[in-house]
């Protein structure tokens, strides 16, 4: 008899302990989780801005000063404007882009997920610093600096002012990092064979707004740096004679591109993809399949609430074929045209044989 060696015992590998849910969200590099984190944080700051707006409306209920003095009124007004623009609108669009853009272009991740995670935590830290600066005694000097620039001349060093400047600078740096990641994602991680002319409008809007942010935000960061030197180290650049006008230019060189380029353009891209989902399609059989030129061309279309597009075709072909994509991925209208061409050629050949 042949001795048979006993089969080796199979030992199960030790189970990898699952990461707790809160820790998984904190350390996650998934673009969907990062996008949701941006959106949740942005809406939390939206609530803060709404509460401040409610207090301001109560103050404006009747003429005169009721619950706020002039200084605190300026502080709350600037806090409302800062929160709604810097901490809500712009980060909310970044969150939407993180969730949808990779799927729109056929990618499964962001180009630099760690950079995007760093940008989110910088944004959250800077937003908290900006909000806390208004709780420090006296408040930041910049309470009226974005509204009445002559207040810079009376600026004094203080913890609140430094917190405000550091918070705004941190949020601005986070915006640049997020924009670099999103632009690189669209340019470098598109599906093979997909050029920039075939990506959805929202992806294009993300690229345009990202380029605007990269070009405009450094101007504001430079202005904040000079302002910090004036406040913390006794400089006389913005606080000297004529200096507030320089601060005004630094704010608006950033503010105008931020409003029209970084906030309006993504909204226009989203509207275009919702209203006209077939904008980038081509009327050819190979573009009607499952690729980026076909029905899944707008990867985030379902989340944006788009309907299936209806393709133009003749009335007779609509009777014979539905203008939706067939299960084989070919174009019904194209099949009708091919069938007509075959019937026409057959009739010509039969008439020629009769003659």
Image: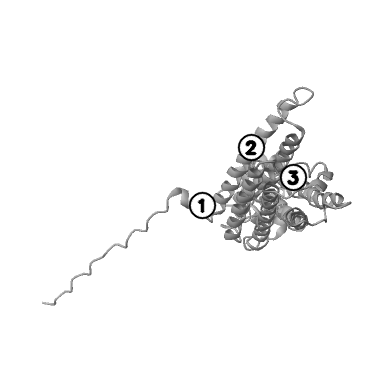
Task: Specify whether residue 331 is in view.
Answer: no
Residue depth check, mark 3 versus mark 2: number of the one nearer the observer: 3
Task: Specify whether residue 204 is in view.
Answer: yes
Which residue does the numbered mark 1 point to in the structure image? 26
Is the residue under label 2 in contact with that under label 3 (CB below 8 Å)? no
N-term mark: 3 or 2: 2
Q: Find residue 10 and report its image quarter.
A: bottom left
In front of the other: 299 or 216: 216
N-term mark: 2 or 1: 1
Q: Residue furthest left?
A: 1
Whether residue 51 is situated above or below residue 130 in the rendered picture:
above
Residue found 37% across the figure and 58% down from its top? 16
N-term mark: 1 or 3: 1
Q: Find residue 89 and report its image quarter.
A: top right
In front of the other: 290 or 286: 290
Where disc 2 sits, the SS reads helix
Which residue does the numbered mark 2 point to in the structure image? 48
- Percent of width and height locating residue 348: 73, 54
Q: Find residue 317 and report its image quarter.
A: top right
Where disc 1 sits, the SS reads helix
Residue found 68% across the figure and 61% down from its top? 187
């Amino acid at each position: 008899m042949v001795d048979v060696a006993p089969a080796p015992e199979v030992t199960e590998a030790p189970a990898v302990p699952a990461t707790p849910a809160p820790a998984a969200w904190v350390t996650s590099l998934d673009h969907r989780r990062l996008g949701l984190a941006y959106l949740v944080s942005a809406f939390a700051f939206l609530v803060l801005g709404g509460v401040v707006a409610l207090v301001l409306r109560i103050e404006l209920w009747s003429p005169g000063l009721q619950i706020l003095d002039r200084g605190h009124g300026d502080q709350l007004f600037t806090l409302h404007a800062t929160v709604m623009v810097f901490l809500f609108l712009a980060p909310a669009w970044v969150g939407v882009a993180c969730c949808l853009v990779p799927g729109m272009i056929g990618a499964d991740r962001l180009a630099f997920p760690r950079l995007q995670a760093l940008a989110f935590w910088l944004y959250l830290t800077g937003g908290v610093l900006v909000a806390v600066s208004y709780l420090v005694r006296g408040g930041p000097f910049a309470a009226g600096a974005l509204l009445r620039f002559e207040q810079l001349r009376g600026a004094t060093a203080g913890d609140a002012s430094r917190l405000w400047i550091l918070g705004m600078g941190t949020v601005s740096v986070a915006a640049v990092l997020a924009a670099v990641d999103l632009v690189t994602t669209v340019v470098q991680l598109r599906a093979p064979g997909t050029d920039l002319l075939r990506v959805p409008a929202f992806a294009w809007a993300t690229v345009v707004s990202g380029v605007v942010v990269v070009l405009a935000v450094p101007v504001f960061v430079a202005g904040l740096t000079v302002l910090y030197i004036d406040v913390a180290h006794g400089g006389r650049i913005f606080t000297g004679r004529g200096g507030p006008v320089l601060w005004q230019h630094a704010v608006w060189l950033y503010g105008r591109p931020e409003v029209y380029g970084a906030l309006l353009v993504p909204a226009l891209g989203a509207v275009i993809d919702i209203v006209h989902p077939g904008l980038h399609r081509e009327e050819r059989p190979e573009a009607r399949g499952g690729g980026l030129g076909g029905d899944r061309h707008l990867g985030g279309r379902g989340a944006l609430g788009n309907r299936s597009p209806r393709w133009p075709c003749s009335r007779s072909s609509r009777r014979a074929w539905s203008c939706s994509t067939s299960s084989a991925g070919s174009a019904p209208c194209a099949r009708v045209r091919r069938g007509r061409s075959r019937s026409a050629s057959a009739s010509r050949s039969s008439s020629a044989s009769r003659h």
